[in-house]
Image (cartoon, rainbow, N blue to C red):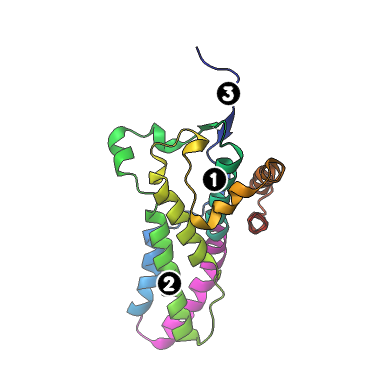
Amino acid sequence: MKDTHCTCVSFDPGFANYNPGLNESNLEQINHISRLKSHNQRKFQVIKLETSFLKPLTTITYIYYGCVAYGSVLASKYNNPPATIEGNHILELPDHEKDNADLTLEVKIIQELYKKLNKDIQFYLKRKSKLPARLEEFSNLYKEFVELNNHFKDLKTTSQIKLPAAMEHFRQYTPEKLDIYEKKLFEITQTGNLEEVLNIS
């Protein structure tokens, strides 16, 4: 008989709605710079790409940290008894797709894009990049979180969530503080003020 009194939580509080969808075609835009004929053409293209990628890279920086922060809240607040996680789309994939699912592919593309564009900015523009300074830190944190949890292929309850060492301190927080953080994360995704995830630490 189904337990109608079970506690259920969302897999995602809404961060997926803001994902800019960066992919290999965006990385190719960076690779194309070196194929331009003149130095001035390459310099102009670097300026153009820094401007166009600033917002999506900043957004994905906040999303990566927000996702890990949300997972840390769930793992800490709903540990005993655990809550059922609803909306994990990985579980709904056909077995062959689920077995091959790799949620770090996007991260790796973005990290390569970020690294190459930063390098081009320093070389052609002779200055520090305007791109988000914490993208590398938070993308590595998110990548670690995904890998620790096997790309969420078996994630059904909050007690299964494994946290990176950098987020283990969430387990020491009071239920009241975790409740505030959980509500704040949903508020952030509703308002779109993604930068506020940095206040959850």
Q: Which range of residues does the magenta coloring cover?
A: 36-59
Classed neighbour count for the residue bearing mark 1: other residues with Cα under 10 Å, few (<14), some (14–19), many (≥20): many
Image x and y of residue 174, in percent: 68, 44
- Kindly report which numbered mark, 3 or 2, lies closer to the viewer in this rendering: 3
Q: Label 2, label 1: how many angstroms apart (C-alpha)?
A: 27 Å
Residue 76, x across and y down, in percent:
58, 43
Label 2 SS: helix
Give the residue drawn at x 57%, y 41%.
Answer: 74
Tell whether label 2 touches label 3 (CB within 8 Å).
no
Residue at the image point whose x is 44% and y is 74% from the top? 117
Q: Earlier in the sequence, mark 1 or mark 3?
A: 3
Q: Is residue 175 placed above or below 111 in the rendered structure? A: above
* Residue type for callout 3: Cys
- Give me the residue at 39% from left, 53% from top: 104
Residue 101, position as x, y percentages in the image: 34, 44
Quadrant of the image occupied by residue 144: bottom left
Type of amino acid at the residue the image marks with label 2: Lys
Prevailing secondary structure class for the magenta stretch in the rendered image: helix
Q: Which residue is mark 3?
A: 6
x, y (%) of residue 32?
36, 73
- The three-letter code of the residue at mark 1 reads Gly
Residue at the disc numbered 1? 71
Q: Is residue 95 magenta?
A: no
In percent of the image, x 62 and y 49: which residue is there?
172
CB atoms at circles 2 and 1 under 8 Å apart? no
Furthest residue to the left? 96
Q: Is 48 one of the magenta-colored residues?
A: yes
Q: Residues within 10 Å of mark 3 (few under 14, many from 20)?
A: few
What is the C-alpha distance between the residues marked 1 and 3? 19 Å
* Quarter occupied by residue 36: bottom left
Secondary structure of the residue carrying numbered label 3: loop
